[in-house]
Amino acid sequence: MSLAVIAGGGVMPPSQGIATGAGRRSQGPYLSRGGRAAHILVAEDEPTINALIEEHLTDAGYRVTTAVDGLDALLALSTARFDVVLTDIRMPRLDGVGLVRHLREEHPQLPVVVFSGHMSEQDRHALLRMRVPSEAILEKPFAFSKLHDAIQMALRRAASQSLLGQGYVQAEMSCAG
């Protein structure tokens, strides 16, 4: 069954009105010339949501590393190369806006997708000022297909600007939701 992430850490089955994109053809993960899938860093403090996103992205063919907050994400960024960062806004120690601010200073070309169930207009405007595209700002609840689309768009934008390290190309795969 396809599920969608909702605010507060829960999930919602598609029968409750969220389009999950189940069964539609979708663009698959970006692959390096060496055949490796794009590496995604997920910063989310809710364990259930973190695990659901990790499972969905892994099933879609991405390599995934998770972080429990912004500081944990910064540690991961100091030890590995990532192709895109997904971050929640409301997290302890270092929130998503602070993480994006750091990314723009230290890794200005790294694509970011942001999501939150409690995003203020101030947060949204701060993200837009830091060059996070509006289509990369998601509000919970969101369907995994919407997250997948935002990741694909971020990776395509980076690839078109020659920002991905080894010349990424896109692979087609069927998204089962």
Image (spheres, helix red, strand yellow):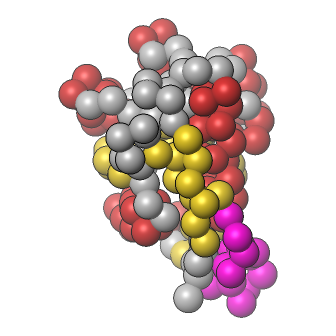
Residue furthest front as drawn? 33
Magenta stretch encompasses residue 23 = yes
Question: Residue at 21% of width from left, 28% of height from top?
Answer: 79
Q: Give the percent coordinates (x, y) of residue 111.
A: 56, 30
Q: Residue furthest left?
A: 79
Magenta part mainly helix, strand or loop? loop
Q: Is residue 87 magenta?
A: no
Q: Quadrant of residue 153?
A: top right
Count of numbered badges drawn on the protein: 0
Of residues 23 and 66, the one drawn nearer to the viewer in this rendering: 23
Q: Is residue 17 above or below residue 27?
A: below
Foreground: 106 or 129? 106
State the residue at coordinates (45%, 16%).
107
Question: Quick check: 60 left or right of 93?
Answer: right
Taking the spot 73% from the left edge, 85% from the top edge, the residue there is 16
Tell me: 59 left or right of 72.
right
Image quadrant in which you'd find residue 48: bottom left
In the image, residue 100 sits, relative to residue 10, either above or below, namely above
Q: Is residue 134 visible?
A: yes
> Can residue 40 be seen by looking at this rendering?
no
Residue 85: image x %, image y %? 47, 37
91 lies above or below 10: above
- What segment carries the magenta color? 13-26
Q: Decide if residue 129 is on the left or right side of residue 86.
A: right
Q: Residue at x 65, y 58 (%)?
A: 27
Pick the quarter of the image with the N terminus.
bottom right
Q: Position of residue 177 (x, y in %)?
A: 60, 75
